[in-house]
Image (cartoon, grey):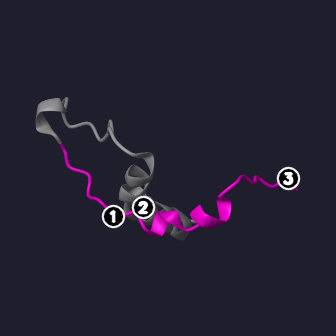
Amino acid sequence: MPVLDWIGKKQVINHDKEVPFRLLKRVESLSVGESENLIIKGDNLEALKAFMPTVTIQASTYTRGI
């Protein structure tokens, strides 16, 4: 199986644990209606960490239904 490798990979393998969790905030002036769609401006890693609780809940709900 192919493996991705790059210079410095060992130093950043756990970098996600150093990035603090941030809460996403709704900006009413930029919102349109009551849609659940989001436009996120910022760092990808911070955005992904903010979604972790949502995705975990959805995944556990999905697997219980199987």
Q: Earlier in the sequence, mark 2 or mark 3?
A: 3
- Which amino acid, mark 3? Pro
Badge 2 marks a residue whose secondary structure is helix
Q: CA distance from mark 1 to mark 2?
A: 9 Å
The range drawn in magenta is 1-26
**Is 43 positioned to the left or the right of 15 in the image?**
left
Asked if the stretch drawn in magenta spans residue 17, the answer is: yes
Q: Earlier in the sequence, mark 1 or mark 2?
A: 1
Q: How many marks are shown on the rendered structure? A: 3
Circles 1 and 2 in contact, beta carbons < 8 Å: yes
Q: Could you tell me which quadrant the C terminus lies in?
A: bottom right
Q: Residues within 10 Å of mark 3 (few under 14, many from 20)?
A: few
Residue 52 numbered tag: 2
Q: Is residue 4 left or right of residue 17?
A: right
Q: Give, as a three-letter code, the residue at label 1.
A: Phe
Q: Position of residue 11 (x, y in %)?
A: 60, 65
Q: Amino acid at mark 2?
A: Met
Residue at which label 1 appears: 21
* Image position, residue 5 (x, y; %): 75, 54
- Tell me if 5 is positioned left or right of 8 in this view: right
Q: Secondary structure at mark 1?
A: loop
How far apart marks 2 and 3 lie (CA) works out to 28 Å
| Residue that label 3 marks | 2
Query: Which label's residue is closer to the chain start, 3 or 1?
Result: 3
